[in-house]
Image (cartoon, rainbow, N blue to C red):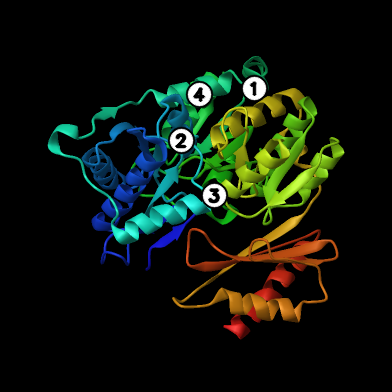
Amino acid sequence: MALIKSISGIRGTIGGKPGDNLTPLDVVKFTAAFGSWTLNKTGIRKIVVGRDGRISGAMVNQLVCNTLNALGIDVIDLGLSTTPTVEMAVVFEKAAGGIIITASHNPKEWNALKLLNSKGEFISGEDGKEVLAKAEKEDFNFAAVDKLGTYTADNSYGDKHIAAILAHDLVNVDNIKKKKFKVVVDAVNSTGAIFVPALLKALGVKESDIILLNGEVTGKFAHNPEPLPQNLSQLSNEVNKRGAHMGIAVDPDVDRLVIVCEDGSMFGEEYTLVAVADYVLSKRKGNTVSNLSSSKALKDITVRHGGEYFPSSVGEVNVVTKMKEVNAVIGGEGNGGIIVPELHYGRDALIGIALFLSFLAETNKTVKQVRGTYPDYFISKNKIELENGVDLNIIFDQLKTKYKSQPLNTEDGLRIEFDNDWVHLRSSNTEPIIRIIAESNFETTAKNIATRLIHDIREFL
C-alpha cells in the first residue's frame, strides 16, 4: 500500500517498507519536514500533539514528539485526545501548529499525521506541497544538544474543550438536564469513550443514563470504525433494548457524529449537520456551507431560514475556506462533520452533540419526529478500489464526453446533475479509491445512478 499524501495529511498502513507504508522512518521524515516548515513559517518553537486510541498510536506519538524535540521544538503532548481538542489547544497554546495522530475512520492497521497550522486548522494545499517538498529533499536540520526542545504532557484540554462548549450561547444545559435523556454511546474503542461521556455528564445527563458500548480504549475496534449504518447494528439494538431516547456514534478521533433514533433506526449521517444547522439558523440568520458530496437537504433548510447555501470542494480545509469567504454561521460535511465557527474552524462531534441535545430539548419532539421534519433524500455511497498508476483525469474526460448534455461541475472531481438528482465522483483524500456518491428523492434511483456510473468507470478502466 503506497503512502497517501493529501490535504488530509500523511496516511498509511503500519509496517512494511519505508516509502510504501507508514513506517517509523516515514513518521520521522514527515514530522521533521513539518516541524522545520512551522519554524520557517512562524519562528515559534512550540507544537501541540495528540492522538486517538489506535494500537500504533503510542509508538507513533513517541516518534513524533522526539523528532520535534530533536528539531529544537517544544512539545505539548495531549496524549489521548480528539481531533477538535487538538485544534483548539493549538490556539490556546499560541503554538506554531499541531499534529494529530489518527487515521480517522480507517481500520486499525492505518495511522496518519494530520497537520495543523497556527490557527488550529488543517494546512492548505499549497502549504502541504511545501511540507512534502521538504520531506522529499530531507530539507531539515536538527538542533545541537543544548538547544533540544522540551516535552510537556498536558491532559487538561479535554476539560477546557468541554468548558468552551458549555459556554456557547446556543448550548442550553438547563433544558437538557430537565429532559432526563437516556443515551447510548458507541465509542468504537477509541477516545470517544473518554470525552463523550464526560461531555454528556457536563450537559446534565445522569451517569446512570449513559450506556457506553465499546468503551475500552484499546484501538482494537469492535467493528469497522466508520460510523455508517452497516457498522452500527449493535448501537441500534442497544438503543431499542434500553428504551433510550437516542444513540450516538463517533469515529475514532471524534470529529464525526452520527445519531440513532429512539426506535433504533438511523437518523442519517447526512442529517446530523442538517438538524444542527436548523437549530443554529433558527437563532441567528446567515449562510451555510457543505461539500459537493453532501445532501441538498442543507440547502433546503438554509433557504427556509432566509440564508444562502454555498458548496465547496471535499475536504475540511476547503469547507473552512468557503465558510470564511461567505461568512457562514455553520457548515460541515455530510459524513456527520459539524463546524461551528464561534468555537473553532474544525469538525467537532462534541459541539454537535451539545447543540443537537439543546435542539431536541427545545422541540419537545423525539429524535424520530425531528427527522420527520426534513425532506427524504436518499444517498448511495460507493467506492471502487484503484490500482497504482491509474490516471483518473483520463477517466473523468471520458465521462465528461459521455454526459456532456448534462450540467457538469469539475471543481472537485466530477459532479453530474440529472434534473433533481446528482452524482459526484472523486478520488479519496484518505484511501486509494474513487468515491461515487449519488442522491435522489428515491432510494432505488440513487442506487441506479451510482450503479450506472460504476459500470461506466469500470468500462473505462
Q: CA distance from mark 4 to mark 1?
A: 11 Å
Q: CA distance from mark 4 to mark 2?
A: 21 Å
Q: Position of residue 368 (x, y in %)?
A: 73, 39
* Closer to viewer: mark 3 or mark 2: 2
Question: Helix, strand, or loop for circle 2?
Answer: loop
Within 10 Å of the Cα at label 2, are there few (<14), some (14-19), or many (20+) other Cα atoms?
A: many
Q: CA distance from mark 2 to mark 1?
A: 27 Å
Q: Earlier in the sequence, mark 4 or mark 3?
A: 4
Question: Helix, strand, or loop for circle 1?
Answer: loop
Identity, as a three-letter code, of the amino acid under mark 1: Val
Q: Earlier in the sequence, mark 3 or mark 2?
A: 2
User: Left of 43 or right of it: where is 418?
Assistant: right
Asked if residue 199 shows in the view, the reply is yes
User: Which residue is disc 4 drawn over?
Assistant: 162
Above-or-below relation of 44 to 290:
above
Q: Position of residue 346 (x, y in %)?
A: 55, 38
User: Left of 195 or right of it: where is 26?
Assistant: left
User: What residue is drawn where x is 47% and y is 50%?
Assistant: 127
Identity, as a three-letter code, of the amino acid under mark 4: Ile
Q: Position of residue 220 (x, y in %)?
A: 35, 49
User: What residue is drawn where x is 74% and y is 57%?
Assistant: 378
Q: Earlier in the sequence, mark 2 or mark 1?
A: 2
Q: Earlier in the sequence, mark 4 or mark 1?
A: 4
User: Which residue is disc 1 drawn over?
Assistant: 171
Quadrant of the image containing the N terminus: bottom left
| Of residues 44 and 281, the one drawn nearer to the viewer in this rendering | 44
Which picture quadrant has residue 403?
bottom right
User: Which residue is disc 2 drawn over?
Assistant: 118
| Of residues 236 and 165, the one drawn nearer to the viewer in this rendering | 165
Q: Earlier in the sequence, mark 1 or mark 3?
A: 1
